[in-house]
Image (tube, rainbow, N blue to C red):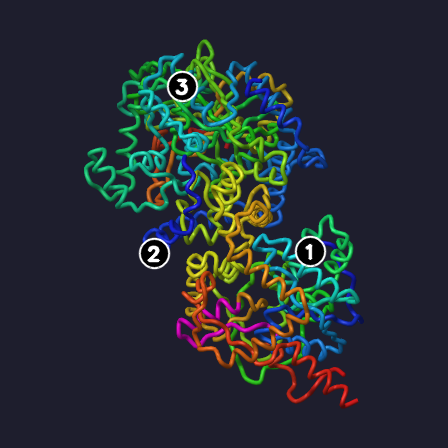
Amino acid sequence: MDVKARDFIPVAQVALSDPALRAAVKRATDTAAQKRLATMFWAGRTHGEALRQQAAQARRRALRDLPALLEQAEAAMTANGIQVLWAADGDEVRRLVLDIAARHEVRRAVKSKSMISEEVALNHALQAHDIDVLETDLGEFIVQLSGETPSHIVTPVIHKSKETIRDLFVRELDMPPTDDAEAMTQFARGHLRRAFLEADMGISGGNFIIAETGALCLVTNEGNGRMVTSLPRVHVALVGIEKVIATVEDYATLTQILPRSSTGQTMTVYTQMIHGPRGADDDGPEHVYVILVDNGRSDIYPTDYAEALACIRCGACLNACPVYEATGGHAYGWVYSGPIGAVITPLLTGLENASPLPHASSLCGLCKEVCPVDIDLPRMLLDLRHDLDEAGHTPPVWKWGIRGWAMVARSPRLFGLAARAAGLGGRFLPPRPPLPPPLNGWTRTRDLPELAPKSFRQLWAERQKAGKRDD
Amino acid sequence: MTSRETILSKLHAARQPFAGLPPAGDMIPVVPADDTSPAALRVRFVAAAEALNCTVTACPDADAAIRHILGLVGTDSTILSWDLKHVPLPGLGAALAAAGIAIAAAGDAHVRAGLTGVDAALAATGSLLLASGPGKPRGASLLPEVHIAVVAAGQIVPDLETWLAAQRAAGLEHLRRLNSVVMISGPSRTADIAMETVMGVHGPGAVQIVLVGES
Amino acid sequence: MDPRPAPAGKCVSLFVTCMVDLLYPQTGMSVVNILEYLGLEVDFPMAQTCCGQPAFNGGYRRDARHVAYQFLKAFQDAEVIVAPSGSCAAMVRHEFPVLFAGDPWLAEAERLASITWEFTEFVVDGLGIDDLKLALPHPQTFAFHDSCHGLRMMGVGEQSRRLLGNVENATIVELVEHDECCGFGGLFAVKMADVSGAMLEKKIEHILACPADTIVLGDVSCMTHINGGLARRGTSKRARHIADVLAEALPEGVTYGR
């Protein structure tokens, strides 16, 4: 997917002036956040926090041992009958999938959710080679039908109203008009069912790979994940290299904490461990491929940002973030939005392509509080801001403005003078003084405070003098 | 260098993150439970499954269970099914035959009901654990609108952690030979349309759990 | 967080913070008056200016360090540092070690970090006092807004509620979503002014719907932003700093200290 993160501010402005969109996003994120609280902490806050730490440790141990675990996972999967491939970047992912499709004479593919496939624009590449690709996750299906991009990593169309979806189905699929969500879902089900049964290839993502058993693990709710990985004769899974975990015990914690943090479910409806293709006497795909995808992750790994790779894509940070609630996901301009998007978009696609994102936060800290693997997102946003400045991405007005401020603020004498000047000047300023940009952003929605006639240090000095006189 | 070599060598060469982490140690279960007696497990399983919109019917014995299943199948002439040797109900085969109900081919997508046993049932989350294998087609619990799952009371275990611990004790090679293991927690669902929860998307819209044995 | 040395009996060096110094000097005086009422000796190192947080939060670490050096110099003789701000206290306590990593001044930065308190935290957790034995001149109703850095980085919020809860004539009601960010965020308020404004709008709606006349908080940065919005909205409701509210309950006409 093209990176449009540089347009954060204008795209956010569009979202901010759309009350229907904002109401939809707020309702979705508030609901998810409340459900998370209920299931994460049903046994008490201490237990829930202990689980978070347990999950955090499991992900960090996996990152610590990543290359060895990847090798172990590859060996285990291969022994189980899965074909393991490695892709350094988007080009290679597309090439590998096309090779597989050609090898197995694939004309039709069905897809369940895969964020990596969005990163590398896989659908587009397949369609360019005359391979039909149908998204089957209901939200992704709606995104595909509307030609848009997802706005939330778990629930991709929270920005769309029911009426909009109804109109879309009526227009594109000849659905008889209805406002009933169940009827609309049943209609989509009928439409997609044929595709499942007739597809040659199923493409999925992967939530975890368990290194010690070589299990490809998926968590889904609709049944399309099972369809895509069971019905077509070829199954291809795209999995980021950071998704490997060490043991089945780690898996038990992570596969249950993910849904609790994400949608407030204790387990998703279908929690799958896939070990291999069909055996001689059962059903399932004849061939299973797992493509381990790098696409920038190995560049993050050696840095202080390695912790960002612990993310299990639950979306809790999006649901908590007041900035995301105000702007929705599209403003973030890429596959991942919200706090995690603000961190990994610059890390995966380049600082210069995502320069507004680290600043798109008030650093309130709620994301870190809700993250099930305790990623210190605010710390990383601060570090990225520093990186942006070091790399020369600070606009001159800020660079020189801050420099000027620092000159005054580092000198008690200049600071004291500035305090006096402010106290005097305050008497002569109009109530709503025109400020130069970018400072005038303040007065768009807020009045300015009054300047005190005497600063604290002046009052203190006078008080000390008066005290000495009394002695 | 292949991509595999490039990626692995980059990762191996990197300064190891989180180098000082302690080893895993004992892990707490996600759903703590004090009472793991069969009676308590049963109560918890039923409550959790019903909270997920499963229908749980307790049948004291195989005959009662078979009668109930025939009632669920109703006037359908075919069902999808696991091989009945994997369904813990002696006499079920004969009863189906007597009712004129045939077992359809494994991939038949036009059959309304699918019948399976389970490999385990997880009390903590009301989940049914089904492994694929000869005579245990995935389609039976996936394609039809209604999934009828026969659970023997003794198959209920406390949680996923317990089941995995048992797999570890038996040697993980056995687990790895199960091509597909799925834990089913309720009917398929989505909330993608305006956050309204709808049951019955691509997987079954109804899960009928037939719980057989000691209450 | 490292446990801090018990502060009882030590002279308090007031870190008044640049915004209080320039815009709300009375809040600084309120802190001084309360601490002296409690029998403490308070000092104000004149060489202080700012902790450097605005520059640090913006990613401008070199500039932040220049300003923070001045802080280290100003407080070099301090035994206890108290600030009427969760975010400024957090800057010293949590970010100074980051800012001065690899710097010869790191040890001094860490020393100052280890003796810095937020004001309500100092009184309740440091001195063990949660009842100031005070009464407001007439009944008022208050609601708290929790400033993010104070709440999440310093763990403060409970302390100010206890202090005000023990003041006679103070009724406390709850502000809906009191722990949600007001949208200030430092330079964010200007860099992302529209998003900041939208977050502020939400906070203002809650304030208007709240029965309290006064919103109490611990950070004048949030206060400036919230009051700026309330004034623009045309309501008479305002946010006030906890120190000013408590100081209002101090006995009249008595001066403290030396």
Local crowd size for mark 1, using a 10 Å CA cut-off: few (<14), some (14–19), many (≥20)? many
Q: Is residue B22 above or below residue A102?
A: below
Q: What residue type is labelled 2?
A: Ser
Q: Residue at x 58, y 24 (%)?
A: B7
Q: Nearer the viewer, residue C14 or A190?
A: C14
Gap in Å between the C-alphas at discs 1 and 3? 52 Å
Where on the picture, by quarter, is residue B16? Answer: top right
Residue B43 in view: no
Instruction: Find out whether residue A326 is within the magenta segment.
Output: no
Local crowd size for mark 3, using a 10 Å CA cut-off: few (<14), some (14–19), many (≥20)? some
**SS state under label 2:** loop
- Magenta residues? C223-243
Q: What residue type is labelled 3?
A: Leu
Disc number lying in front (2 or 1): 1
Magenta segment, principal secondary structure? Answer: helix
Instruction: Find out whether residue C237 is within the magenta segment.
Output: yes
Q: Residue A98 shows which numbered tag?
A: 3
Q: Which residue is drawn at 46% across and 17% down?
A: A288
Q: Where is residue A231 in the image (x, y as percent from the top left)?
A: 38, 19
Q: Nearer the viewer, residue A230 or B89?
A: A230
Q: Nearer the viewer, residue A384 or A427?
A: A427
Which residue matches tag 1? C96
Are dots 1 and 3 in contact, CB under 8 Å?
A: no
**SS state under label 3:** helix
Which residue matches tag 2? A17
Q: Which amino acid does label 1 sit on?
A: Phe
Could you tell which of marks 2 and 3 lies nearer the N-terminus?
A: 2
Instruction: Identify the subunit bearing mark 2.
Output: A
Are dots 2 and 3 in contact, CB under 8 Å?
A: no
